[in-house]
Image (cartoon, coloured by chain):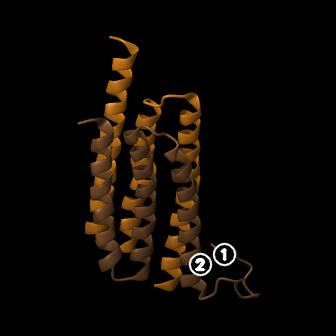
Chain colours: A brown, B orange
Amino acid sequence: MSMFAVAAIAVLVSIMLALVRAFTGPTVFDRILAVNATGTLTVVLISVYGFLDGRPEFLDIALLYALINFIGTVAVTKYVKFKDLGFPQDDRDEGDL
Amino acid sequence: MSLDLALDILSWACIIGGAFFALVGAVGILRLPDVYSRMHAAGMIDTLGIGLILIGLMLQAPAWIVVMKLGLILAFVFFTSPTATYALARAALDGG
């Protein structure tokens, strides 16, 4: 079995395990963490599948999904923390994070 | 020992190591007791898991542009994953 197939199978099993935590986790922060890990593993899976199929052009898609995953995680965290996606209250001089 | 064989052995080692850390991190996310300890396991996936697998892929790349794209993905994930983990940990601390 080629090394790309081994990597793809291992990453698929890891995605399934992380998704179990996304479904069962008692707090919302467990779920955000599990979805962030699933997104990072999806980036790896897209890259490995690109090499498996002999088309390294899939790396562009993987880079794009890495960007989307980061922005999505920070946006959901900000919404859960502040209940608002706009600016936080004016008397706080801290930032969004 | 030709260069192709050496590159194959090295990339096998990197990909097996990266897959191992991804599996250990995923089992850690599932089995650890608290959300803060689960963040340690997720951080292991974000750095060692993706890092070793992408380095293993870099050694098998057909052209230099592919190596640069993989390096770009790696640099981006290395810079943004601790930021997202920090934001999440701070929100978990403030919110409960």
B76 relative position to A52: left or right: right
Residue at mark 2: chain: A
Q: Is residue B61 above or below residue A13?
A: above
Identify the mark at residue A96; answer none if there is no mark: 1
Pointer 2 and pointer 1 on the same chain: yes
Residue lying furthest left in this view?
A1
Location of residue B1 by image quarter = top left
Q: Quadrant of the C terminus of chain B?
A: bottom left
Could you tell me the amino acid type at mark 2?
Lys
Q: Which residue is mark 2?
A: A78
The alpha-carbon separation of the residues under discs 2 and 1 comes to 7 Å
- Identified at 40% across, 44% down, the residue is A48
Could you tell me the amino acid type at mark 1?
Asp
- Identified at 62% across, 72% down, the residue is A97
Residue A18 image position (x, y, % from top left) = 33, 66
Q: Judge whether residue B28 can be spotted in this image.
A: no
Residues at badges 2 and 1 in contact (C-beta under 8 Å)? yes
Which circle's residue, 2 or 1, is located before the other in the chain? 2
Residue B70 image position (x, y, % from top left) = 53, 41
B55 relative position to B1: left or right: right
- Identified at 37% across, 40% down, the residue is A52
Q: Is residue B59 above or below residue A23?
A: above
Residue lying furthest top in this view?
B1
Residue A51 image position (x, y, % from top left) = 41, 39
Residue at mark 1: chain: A
Q: Judge whether residue A27 can be spotted in this image.
A: yes
Taking depth in this image into account, of A62 and A84 the one nearest to the observer is A62
